[in-house]
Amino acid sequence: MLCVRKLAKRYGARVVFRDVNFEVEVGTVAAVLGSNGAGKSTLLKIVAGLTRPTSGRVQWLPTGDAQGALDAEVLQWQCGLAAPDAPVYRELTVGENLEFFGRVRGVELTPDAVLSHLEKFSLHTRRNDLAMDLSSGLRARLQLAVATLHRAPLLLLDEPSANLDEAGRAILQRVVEAQREQGLALIATNDPRDLELCDERIEL
Amino acid sequence: MEIGSSAAIQPPGARESTLHPLTALVPRATWATVQAVFWKDWRSEWRTRAALNSIALFSIASPVALSFSVARQRLEPETLAGLLWTVLLFAALVGLARSFVKEEESGTATLLRLSCPPDAVLWGKALFNLVLLVGTQAAAVPIFVLLLNAQLSRAGLLLLVLLLGDVGLAVVSSLLGAIASQARARGSLFAAIAVPLVLPLLVAASTGTAAAFGAVGPQGDFWPALQIMLGYDVAVVTAAWMLFDFVWSA
């Protein structure tokens, strides 16, 4: 279970959000909603351990037991993230991106495993293409492929539908359904189509 | 459809957290992860040649320019050594921060922070910087020696001084590159904080190189210079190892 308590973020005098509280159970997909600038992407980065909150805390309770709570340092390694401002390496090929993120995450990937994973995102025919040569939609699929490479218990998706076509949206739907089986997902979005994938709403 | 290929995150060399005995695993750098960062940077650099072109151009153009400006003059070994290390230092300043600056400018630092143990980022990029320095110096130093008529009386000593100097420069520039890349004035900040920090290395390297170029007297005694360079390298490697996690996660 993901547990967020009294979370606040401020940049100088500007308050992004404050007193944010929610819990998301394993097997649940939650939408993070709010107007532009409400702090949806910031919230996801705080949950991922990439940005420090001004106050409050984020805990991951793998067993639902408060005594087994994991701190932010550990939580970072339990996350998969796909976000517009977290791109993959444009100068590497699709396959090289997957191999790199697999190796640094400790997932040893054989060439067959890379191909098999890319097939799930319909990217197998573009394996040797540089990421910079992909369309924005295909790059979004590659980001999803990287985010799901290590079967993260916590999947964070920021505006996942922004550049996806219908086929890409079907892939996203399968990713989200698979995530229910292995953990939970937070989706920061304002797209009504994404809300159809979600069980809960968190308003900022 | 099953997404993913392994049951759980359990990176090699992971250590257990005190908070949860089964799943709280914080990955540590291993040789495999260091290599992964190095090859990622190398492939990326080979395809864009952003740092390589800057360093190579500066390293090779400077001796050519110097050879014209001091034409017909017989320079002392101490002067030659000082000129060589000035060229190598500024070539390093021009290019070595690029590996971190590029991560921040392109936004890839976000996924790198999320996915890769900080130690692996540091040592992978330091190794990349070292290879970049050694590679460009393999071309630049012979050109310098030929164009400026340096008498190379101790080639082995010059190689040792270059190697010790490169290790220090590569590690310092990796640590400072990580700091500077998070600032707005990235390029100028890197040079401003790097120059004072590498001065001890520069002085010792110049003394050692002067001895390699045939200096006699106090300047010909290279052992103190080698000891200072070795001590400097040990100090910066230790400092980088201790500080990088804080710098990278800040």
Image (cartoon, rainbow, N blue to C red):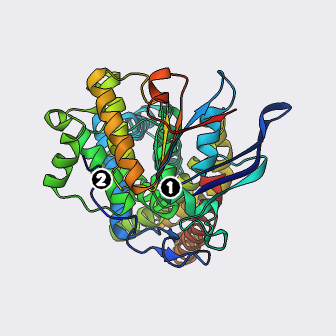
Residue B184: image quadrant is top right
Asked if badges 1 and 2 are on one and the same chain, I answer no
Look at 59% across and 72% down and name the residue there.
B238
The image position of residue A100, as x and y in percent, is: 32, 51
User: Alpha-carbon distance for marks 1 and 2?
Assistant: 17 Å
Residue carrying label 1: A26
- Subunit ID for the residue under disc 2: B
Q: Which residue in the protein does label 2 denote?
A: B4
Q: Which of B161 and B68 is in front in this view?
A: B161
Using residue A22 as the reference point, say whether residue A107 is left or right of it.
Answer: left
In the rendered view, would you say A110 is above or below B59? below
Kindly tell me whether residue A80 is visible in this rendering: yes
Label 2 residue SS: loop
- Residue at figure coordinates x 22%, y 47% from the top left: A117
Residue A177: give x, y in percent of width and height. Answer: 36, 43
Task: Name which residue type carries label 1.
Answer: Val
Residue B20 occupies quadrant: bottom right
Q: Report helix, strand or loop for mark 1.
A: loop
